[in-house]
Image (tube, rainbow, N blue to C red):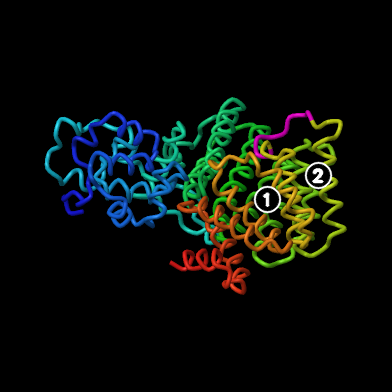
Amino acid sequence: MSGDLSPTALPAHVLGRADVQAALKRHDFGQVFKLARQWGGISFLKIADACDIKPERVGKLARGDGAITTYEKIACIADALGIPGHMIGMAPRPWEQASTPTSPSRPELISPLATPAPRISNVPETDDLGTVDLEGDEVQRRRFLAASLGIATGAAMTPADTAGRRIGHRQVQHLQRRTARLRSLDDVLGGADTRHIYRAELGRTMNLLRNASYTEGTGRQLLSLVAEQAQQAGWAAFDAGRQTEASALYEKAFQAATAAQDAALAGNSLAFLAYQQVSTGTSGVATAAASCETASADAPATVRALLFERRAWAHAKAGQAKETEQALGQAEEALMGNNSDRPGPDWSSWVDTRELQIMKGRCWTELHRPLRAVPALEAALADFDDTHARDKSLYLTWLAHAYMDAGEIEQSATVITKAMDLSTGIGSVRPQQRANEFLLRLQPHRAIAPLAELLDRAAM
């Protein structure tokens, strides 16, 4: 901004209000927009134009419908409304250093994120994974996102830091807990926002594996952790639309899990690969079957259910109804079986009866069985919180397709509208891709007024 505040910058008396500061602290930008209009006289139209948000979206946010979650959009709003970085957990914005001294109502508080960010080094930079550059804004994005969830993120250790270092079971347990905490980011953010975070964690663990000193047992634990982190990084890359990178990471995960003799993680690596194959138009049936065979029969219930779910999905995408139903039955049997109360690993803890119900609905939608798909998806999504915007918006796209197959055209349009609203601003390519696919199915029904309005809105 060349040192000048934006024309839509919030006046000092607005930024000094307790209700504005509270809304900024919890990232409730809809409330910020509302208060900006009320106390600063800044119209929603001006806010929309300055923040590059559609006017109707600004209005919905002000009414409490939806949320802003991506780093880029939050940074854009901060610059457009002249919000100092420390008020939203960011480092000072570039225009702050060059602007005139702030008034007492805009104190320059020292943010823990304001110190120069260390270089993230030694993340794997092989040809198959691509070069990772986390300088500048990407470092700030990583630290900002992690800080917002209370997770400390230091730089990955270099070979010089780890050479000769002796580590044991306790240190590996600490890294495992850290990985579990970081995994929770995927509940509310898309792969575009988490990809670099997970890649940096993988680099940290690989540095230990290559350069530290440890026993054979600890080495196997580190290999398992590499496999787990590579899977998470691969998932983020997949969600961000970086398919080549995702494949390379899944392959790395499988190799590490195999070397660690961790059958469950090796099976899950193949399940991830199968899911990606299916999503990119390749049959993943053989890979999905191999994932179930790789994991031992005594694997925890959530692990076996997850692998059978992915197998069911591969069969459904291949149009194999009988095999789909069989795999879904095996997943349900795993969750309800005698050892279903046996704790599974954190990476499979999200698999439960609702997740299985959603997968059933998705599979039956793919097989064009709306009478089975609609009840399953409606029941599972009835109390599915909107804070899980990426996942809910994705699942709603399958419900929209199922309604379309059932001939309920207007209801399908209502559902896809909800999905599109939820997916706004999410760092994932998948919801929009699926919404666009569905909108093509709506084109022949443009004569129906509400559908024409929806299609015109989507084209804006």
In this view, the residue in front, 154 or 41, is 41
Horizontal and vertical percent position of residue 182: 53, 38
Indicate the amino acid at tag 1: Gln
Left of 271 or right of it: where is 297?
Answer: right
Q: Which residue is mark 2?
A: 331
Q: Which secondary structure dominates the residues rendered in magenta?
A: loop
Splitting the image into 4 quarters, where does residue 17 fall?
top left
Q: Which residue is mark 1?
A: 255
In this view, the residue in front, 213 or 80, is 80
Horizontal and vertical percent position of residue 453: 50, 65
Distance between mark 2 and mark 1 Cα atoms = 26 Å
Foreground disc of the pair 2, 1: 2
Kind of element beneath mark 2: helix
* Region rendered in magenta: 341-348
Kind of element beneath mark 1: helix
Assess disc 1: are there few (<14), some (14-19) or many (≥20) residues with their C-alpha within 10 Å of its C-alpha.
some
Residue located at (39% from left, 49% from top): 59
Indicate the amino acid at tag 2: Ala
CB contact under 8 Å: marks 2 and 1: no
Query: Considering the image in quadrants, where does the C terminus appear?
Result: bottom left
Left of 304 or right of it: where is 400?
Answer: left
